[in-house]
Image (cartoon, rainbow, N blue to C red):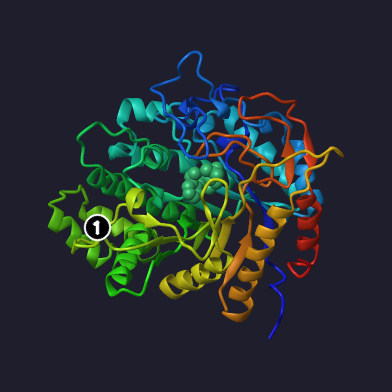
Amino acid sequence: MSNSLPNHFLWGGAVAAHQLEGAWDIDGKGISVADVMTVGGPDHYRSITKGIIAGEYYPNHEGIDFYHRYKADIALFAEMGFTCFRTSIAWTRIFPKGDETEPNEAGLQFYDDLFDECLKYGIEPIVTLSHFEMPYALVENYGGFRNRQTIDFFERFATACLTHFHTKVKHWMTFNEINNQANFNEDFAPFTNSGIYYEPGENREEIMYQAAHYELVASAKVVKIGHEINPDLEIGCMIAMGPIYPQTCHPKDIIMAQKAMEHRYYFADVHVHGTYPEWLKKEWTRKGYQLDITEDDLTILETGTVDYIGLSYYMSFAIRHTPGSENFDYDESTQLVRNEYVKASDWGWQIDPEGLRYTLNWLTDMYHLPLFIVENGFGAYDQVDADGLVHDTYRIDYLKAHIVEMKKAVIEDGVDLIGYTPWGCIDLVSAGTGEMEKRYGFIYVDKDNAGNGSLERSKKDSFYWYQNVISSNGDAL
Ligand code: P53
């Protein structure tokens, strides 16, 4: 048995357009949902404003100015030895308001140049079509994915991208972390996943199931279209993974954890199997939810199943049942509990490398598809020392421990894994909090939470460490 990862294993890093490009209103780009979010902090989400309000600070407007600096940044990725680079195509660069019929040529040109720059170094671009950056005009004018018409708008955008870039990009993903919205009682996920602002008194869960259904249909259509455009394309879904452990072996805790996992991960069932699980159909009937799901939709779901599962993995969770209640309904915003066996980051994210091995095995047992870890990483405060450098041993420790478990899953358990792209390979704006100072990068970017800084780039200790990891194909940790 080999003790190493396969030779073709892809190593790289991951970002999303809205978190680093900046240039939010340049070359015809429209306003996206990310452009109306302010800065939050470790214990609170950022605010979502109705449109852009004068005097508010919107960190994504400038990002780290990757739009103008991508050549130098990609040269640094090449120096680390990346063989792939995951980013997204900002929907609003291609269709600024979302409902245009023709794509914006300047937007296509930017991504042509960006992908060519990657390919020049032998770096394969890996592309997410929708990564929390829907055109804001679709929210205002159509209600985002509350509206069936948004399926057509997404299809038009995705078709333009697949047609234009299929010779440069082989691996695609449709909707980033489509399952974040299982946490429907918070405002962040429904807005970033689906462009939904909830009104007081609405049944949030029912609306979430409807929006997610439209997205799953849109995804399936795009998988099918992509394969028609080029049968060699690999088109995946993207799921935010984190196992939800039972707090104890109390049988009700076991069932509660099972129900929580079902609610958080049914999205993958639909993407992979093309059908809804039985428990969910029963739940909709029990709760009297009348969803708009047509026979045509069900056929589309079956004909557009994904080629692989892209996943993010940052942490694990734990849950217990509510004593005195026979009800196993899942509310992610109130029912999760601390796991006393693991530590947490400064943002309360529970660090659990073995949970990654568990997760990769769980996904393989459930779905029997190739997997791709397209996000993993440690958001931390970095300090520039007197020598002018960032000595981020804590980040190296986190990544090392996760790679060790990832290798066990592949080498000892036989998991079919395409590659590994740690999140935020260059410091960027946090999605959840809007902070710059929640840093993930191997490359430090001089900018703070208020937007001050030179934007200058410098290599952290983890940069050299990751370079060795890649050149040894994961052996030198
Ligand atoms: P930030 C929540 C839970 C897990 C992953 O997140 C999440 C979120 C949303 O915050 O998002 C993914 O920046 C996402 C990236 C994001 C990254 O994880 O909040 O796909 O866009 O930046 C890290 O620390």
Secondary structure, mark 1, is loop
Q: Amino acid at mark 1?
A: Asp
Q: Quadrant of the N terminus?
A: bottom right
**Does the numbered disc 1 mark a residue whose Cβ is under 8 Å from ligand 1?**
no
425 or 349: nearer the eye? Answer: 349
Residue, far right? 387
Instruction: For label 1, count other residues whose C-alpha is less than 10 Å away and answer few (under 14), some (14-19) or many (20+).
Output: some
Image spot of residue 315 (x, y percent): 52, 57
What residue is drawn where x is 63% and y is 38%?
428
Q: How many marks do you count on the picture?
A: 1
The percent coordinates of residue 146 (x first, y second) are: 28, 38
Q: Give the x, y percent position of residue 32.
A: 47, 29
Residue at position x 45%, y 64% in the image: 243
Q: Report the residue at 32% width, 25% height from top.
A: 141
- Asked whether the viewer can see residue 386, the reply is yes
408 versus 241 height, above or below: below
Provide residue 401's location: percent of width, then percent of height. 65, 65
Q: Which residue is mark 1?
A: 329
Toward the viewer: 222 or 378? 378
In the rendered structure, the answer to whether residue 78 lies left or right of residue 220 reads: right
